[in-house]
């Protein structure tokens, strides 16, 4: 069942004005310079990278050097009107601040909205999958979706922009304005959110990026501290799982996967819970449901990330749980099965791959809400997670939920400093089956013969982020390919 919401939900999930994008507040060097100004230090406000491992920024008087360290791409951004820097081994020279921009991924689009510079955007890819209410409204009249079925038209659209934010493998060799972003590959939640600084340098919006990220970081640290204080002795075990049924894209062979992506480990640990780690690899794939269920024996909470959404009964069947009434699995008996698909677009796109990437503090708040449901108050409703076992509905976000399409996107997290966490009670039904006083991560050793593949990268995240909900079949093939590498 899908619930169309008519009003903004409690913690301002959608768009509220922080600063109108027509304002130059938080922007620097908004005008082009003359050649006589080319020796001036034009960037008094700088962004320093603290958590992210996959990009770097260097500042010079009239230009910036931005490196994507995961793809070995280097970009020279020079103030418009100044002399183009004479530098070698540069993938793209881009005058800044950019007058127009395009983005292929929904997470890149979210960072642009978080900066409040969406008035510069001309084109967006995977438009039906975009969940942001205000980006949806802009797509109705202002922003044009990429004509993804026509390569000639798409090339023309890309060439009409000052910069095109793409993903690895999506670069157009016919253009010189493509910039590859890989925020979704960062190994930490704060590292992912810090990519707001990467996007900011193209718009000379460092002040906005620094202010936004410092707030996210401070709030995240507060949540971590409070969760550690309140829940150190009662830490449920969390497993991030997925199932892929047999299709022509995986040789008609079903498989089951447990993810141990680094950023998920950080979130679970910081939320006052424990992470299931099957083998020490970033992702482990199983060839049989029996082996998969064996690995979940000590799990208290399952977060299902399967590509295709389904009911709780279908999940149990896919996981091999034949009679839930006789099950001894804590996550079954206590009805603790979640999916991160609560907020969706009409076409089924998930906000899970937009806002949580940009707002690590809100994401941590949600994970705490899953692990400790009463951490703020009884009946706390996570932003992105819904309890599949309780048949909680999805929420469809539409353009009608936007209040100001040019507003800087507001962080949906609560202010942690204003909250009083409720003490965890071992006798509460929320902790049924949870072992007390367990402080170490759970390691489950399993026979290698039952594992299809162990991977040092969480292929499900990378693949899922790079496609939309309408491409599930292709995504299954992509996951299988990545997992086999």
Image (spheres, rainbow, N blue to C red):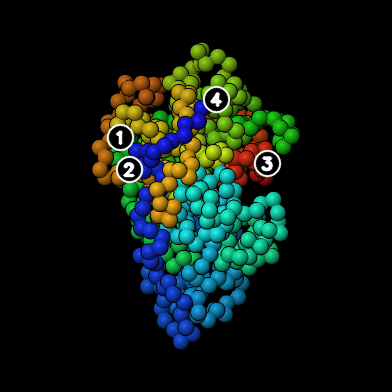
Mark 4 or mark 2, which is nearer the start of the sequence?
Answer: 4
Crowd band around label 2 with a 10 angstrom C-alpha radius: few (<14), some (14–19), many (20+): some
Label 1 near label 3: C-beta < 8 Å? no
Label 2 near label 3: C-beta < 8 Å? no
Mark 2 or mark 3, which is nearer the start of the sequence?
Answer: 2
User: Label 3, on which residue?
Assistant: 474
Label 2 near label 1: C-beta < 8 Å? yes
- Which SS class for mark 1? loop
Measure the C-alpha gap from mark 1 to mark 4. Answer: 28 Å
Residue 83 drawn at (x, y percent): 53, 81
Residue 187 drawn at (x, y percent): 49, 49
Crowd band around label 1 with a 10 angstrom C-alpha radius: few (<14), some (14–19), many (20+): some
Measure the C-alpha gap from mark 3 to mark 2. Answer: 37 Å
User: Label 1, on which residue?
Assistant: 376
Residue 206 drawn at (x, y percent): 41, 64
Measure the C-alpha gap from mark 1 to mark 2. Answer: 10 Å
User: Label 4, on which residue?
Assistant: 311
User: Label 2, on which residue?
Assistant: 414
Q: Nearer the viewer, residue 410 or 46?
A: 410
Mark 2 or mark 1, which is nearer the start of the sequence?
Answer: 1
Q: Residue at x 53, y 64 (%)?
A: 100
């Amino acid at each position: 069942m899908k619930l169309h919401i008519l009003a903004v939900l409690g913690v301002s999930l959608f768009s509220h004005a922080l600063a109108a994008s027509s304002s130059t507040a938080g922007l620097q060097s908004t005008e082009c310079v003359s050649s006589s100004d080319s020796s001036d230090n034009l960037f008094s406000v700088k962004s320093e990278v603290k958590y992210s491992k996959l990009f770097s920024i260097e500042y010079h008087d009239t230009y910036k050097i931005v490196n994507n360290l995961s793809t070995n791409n280097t970009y020279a951004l020079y103030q418009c009107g100044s002399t183009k820097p004479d530098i070698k081994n540069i993938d793209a020279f881009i005058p800044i601040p950019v007058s127009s921009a395009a983005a292929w991924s929904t997470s890149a689009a979210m960072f642009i909205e978080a900066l409040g510079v969406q008035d510069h955007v001309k084109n967006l890819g995977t438009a039906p999958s975009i969940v942001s209410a205000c980006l949806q409204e802009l797509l109705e009249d202002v922003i044009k979706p990429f004509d993804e079925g026509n390569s000639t038209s798409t090339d023309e659209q890309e060439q009409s922009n000052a910069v095109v934010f793409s993903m690895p493998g999506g670069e157009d060799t016919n253009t010189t304005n493509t910039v590859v972003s890989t925020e979704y590959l960062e190994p930490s939640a704060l590292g992912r959110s810090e990519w707001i600084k990467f996007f900011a340098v193209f718009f000379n919006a460092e002040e906005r990026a620094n202010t936004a990220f410092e707030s996210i970081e401070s709030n995240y640290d507060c949540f971590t501290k409070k969760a550690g204080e309140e829940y150190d002795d009662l830490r449920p075990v969390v497993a991030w799982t997925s199932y892929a049924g047999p299709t022509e894209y995986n040789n008609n062979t079903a498989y089951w996967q447990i993810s141990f992506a680094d950023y998920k480990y950080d979130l679970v640990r910081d939320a006052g819970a424990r992470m299931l780690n099957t083998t020490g690899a970033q992702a482990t794939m199983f060839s049989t449901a029996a082996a998969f269920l064996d690995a979940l024996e000590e799990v208290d909470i399952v977060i299902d990330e399967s590509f295709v959404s389904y009911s709780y009964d279908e999940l149990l069947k896919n996981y091999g749980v034949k009679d839930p009434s006789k099950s001894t699995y804590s996550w079954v008996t206590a009805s603790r099965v979640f999916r991160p698909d609560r907020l969706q677009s009409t076409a089924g796109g998930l906000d899970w791959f937009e806002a949580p990437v940009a707002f690590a503090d809100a994401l941590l708040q949600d994970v705490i809400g899953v692990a400790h449901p009463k951490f703020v108050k009884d009946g706390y409703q996570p932003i992105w997670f819904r309890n599949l076992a309780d048949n909680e509905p999805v929420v469809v976000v539409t353009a009608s939920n936007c209040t100001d399409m040019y507003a800087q996107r507001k962080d949906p997290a609560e202010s942690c400093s204003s909250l009083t966490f409720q003490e965890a009670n071992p006798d509460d039904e929320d902790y049924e089956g949870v072992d007390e006083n367990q402080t170490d991560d759970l390691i489950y050793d399993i026979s290698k013969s039952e594992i299809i593949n162990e991977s040092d990268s969480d292929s499900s995240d990378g693949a899922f982020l790079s496609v939309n909900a309408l491409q599930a079949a292709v995504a299954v093939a992509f996951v299988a390919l990545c997992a086999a590498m």
